Image: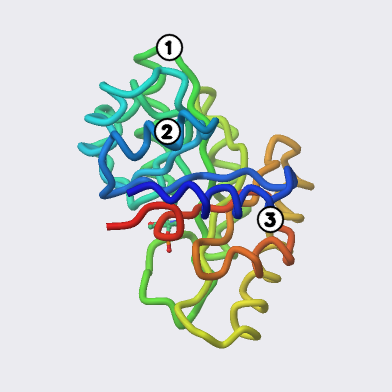
């Protein structure tokens, strides 16, 4: 079920200063259509099959963002549909995206995913010390367009711990965007922590459970 009131509340909070990636994973196309009818265009999915099936039947001007761990053998499948891959976390994945995007004669927007929260159970993502190497490798790939970075807050109720991870994310983002002026998006913040992420300087939040229920 799509929560229209919650959606409007979130848009008010974002107040045009941050973009909303509505995370629609595990929710049916009809719920996505309801959000679309209210003007939502960016949707996040974390499974290749699910993204492709939904993209086939939903309006073509939806921007599909891939936000889950991406296996290299799924890149070819999602490329015809996806507008941005937020979860770029290795050189090998970048090279696969390059190869497949070249075949389709398109460029793909990507974000570098960083693992910053030490207490996080989710171990995917680059380490901050790999950032320079990734920037350099990606400049060799003409069909891969770096537009931002993505990260997750820690799984904790400790507000100070969350704030400190988000502050680290913002600092890294500042450095990356200084080195590469195409890097403009800091995708940070989910249903439980997006207000803290916005305070820290995030300009894209990925919100799922607050907007979709059941
Ligand atoms: C599921 C997911 C989200 C949304 O999380 P909610 O807590 O449901 O808002 C955001 N980012 C990623 C990478 C996800 O997998």
Residue 20 location in percent, x, y? 57, 45
Q: Residue furthest top?
A: 105
Q: Is residue 38 above or below residue 199?
A: above
Nearest to the eye among marks 2 and 3: give it: 3
Whether residue 49 appears in this view of the structure is yes
Which mark sits nearer the N-terminus, 2 or 3?
3
Q: What x and y, as percent, mark residue 206?
A: 51, 52
The quarter of the image that holds ligand 1 is bottom left
Q: Is residue 212 above or below residue 38?
A: below
Residue under the image location 73 percent in, 43 percent down: 16
- Is residue 73 at least partly visible in the picture? no
Question: Residue 64: which numbered mark, if any?
Answer: 2
Q: Which quadrant: the C terminus?
A: bottom left
Q: CA distance from mark 2 to mark 3?
A: 23 Å
Sequence order check: which comes first, mark 1 or mark 3? Answer: 3
Residue pointed to by mark 1:
105
User: For the point 37% across and 14% down, which residue is it?
Assistant: 104
Q: Secondary structure at mark 3?
A: helix
Seen in the image, is 133 located left or right of residue 212? right
Q: Residue 110: percent from the left, percent from the top? A: 51, 38
- Look at 35% across and 26% down and name the residue there: 79
Front one among 79 and 40: 40
The residue labelled by disc 3 is 13
Element assignment for label 1: loop
In this picture, residue 183 sits left or right of residue 97: right
Q: Earlier in the sequence, mark 2 or mark 1?
A: 2
Measure how far apart labels 2 and 1 are at the Cα level: 19 Å
Q: Are marks 2 and 3 in contact (CB under 8 Å)?
A: no
Judged from the image, the secondary structure of the residue bearing numbered disc 2 is: strand
What number of labels is visible?
Answer: 3
């Amino acid at each position: 079920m799509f929560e229209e009131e919650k959606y409007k509340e979130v848009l008010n909070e974002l107040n045009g200063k941050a973009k909303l990636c509505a995370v629609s994973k595990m929710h049916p196309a009809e719920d996505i259509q309801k959000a679309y009818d209210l003007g939502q265009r960016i949707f996040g999915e974390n499974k290749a099959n699910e993204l492709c099936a939904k993209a086939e039947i939903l309006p073509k001007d939806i921007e599909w963002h891939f936000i889950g761990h991406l296996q290299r053998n799924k890149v070819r499948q999602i490329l015809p549909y996806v507008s941005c891959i937020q979860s770029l976390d290795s050189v090998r994945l970048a090279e696969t995206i390059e190869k497949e995007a070249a075949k389709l004669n398109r460029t793909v927007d990507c974000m570098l995913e960083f693992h910053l929260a030490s207490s996080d159970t989710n171990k995917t993502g680059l380490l901050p010390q790999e950032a320079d190497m990734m920037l350099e490798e990606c400049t060799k790939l003409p069909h891969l367009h770096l537009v931002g970075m993505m990260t997750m807050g820690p799984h904790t109720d400790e507000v100070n711990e969350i704030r400190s991870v988000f502050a680290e994310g913002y600092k890294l983002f500042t450095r990356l965007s200084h080195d590469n002026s195409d890097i403009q998006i800091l995708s940070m913040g989910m249903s439980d922590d997006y207000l803290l992420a916005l305070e820290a300087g995030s300009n894209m939040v990925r919100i799922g459970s607050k907007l979709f229920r059941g």
